[in-house]
Image (spheres, grey):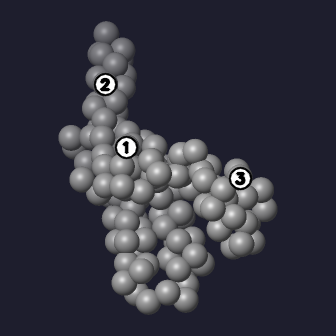
Amino acid sequence: MAGLALAFAHGINKIPPTEGFIGGVEALGFPFPVLFAWSAGVAEFVGGLCLAIGLLTRPASLLIAFTMAVAFFLRHADDPFGSKEKAYLFGGIALLYLFTGGGRFSVDAFLRNQVSKRTVSRYAR
C-alpha cells in the first residue's frame, strides 16, 4: 500500500516535472536540476510501483530512501515536523524494504525461485 500511495499520491504529479518543481530542485543546489527533478519523480512513481509489486525491491527502496532523505533534510529542513512527516514515513518504509527485501510473495521471490529451479534441474541430470 505504501508503494501505491507514493506512486499515485506523489510521484505521478512529478512526471513530467513542473517548472516549479524544477526550480525547487535548483534552489536546493543540485546540478542539472531537470535531471534531478526527473530522477525524483521516477523514484517516487516507478519506485513506488516496484515496491508495491516487489520487483527490484532493494534498488527501488534505495532510490526512494535517497529521495525522501533529500525531501526531509533539505527541502523541508526548516518546516515543522508535520510538513516533513510524509518524507519521514516513506523513507522509513523504504529503509525497511531495503534491509528485508520484498518477501516471499514478491515478484523478486518468484523470479529467484524460477532461477533456482532451473539451476537445480540443470545439475540434477
Q: Classify mark 3: residues with Cα within 10 Å, few (<14), some (14-19) or many (20+).
A: some
* Dot 1: element: helix
Q: Amino acid at mark 2?
A: Gln
Residue at left offset 49%, top offset 67%: 68
Residue at left offset 61%, top offset 61%: 21
Return the residue found at the far front.
19
Q: Give the image quarter of residue 66.
A: bottom right
Which of pointers 2 and 1 lies earlier in the amino acid sequence?
1
For the residues labelled 3 and 2, the Cα–Cα distance comes to: 39 Å
Residue at left offset 37%, top offset 43%: 49
Residue 83 seen anywhere in this rendered image of the structure: yes
Q: Nearer the viewer, residue 73 or 61?
A: 73
Pinpoint residue 116: horizontal percent, then vertical percent: 33, 28
Q: Amino acid at mark 1?
A: Leu
Instruction: Tell me the quarter of the image containing the C terminus.
Output: top left
Pinpoint residue 6: horizontal percent, then vertical percent: 37, 56
Q: Nearer the viewer, residue 53 or 122?
A: 53
**Residue that mark 1 sits on:** 49
Label tally = 3
* Dot 3: element: helix
Q: Give the image quarter of residue 50.
A: top left
For the residues labelled 2 and 1, the Cα–Cα distance comes to: 22 Å
**Residue that mark 2 sits on:** 114
Label 2 vs label 1, nearer the camera? 1
**Residue that mark 3 sits on:** 34
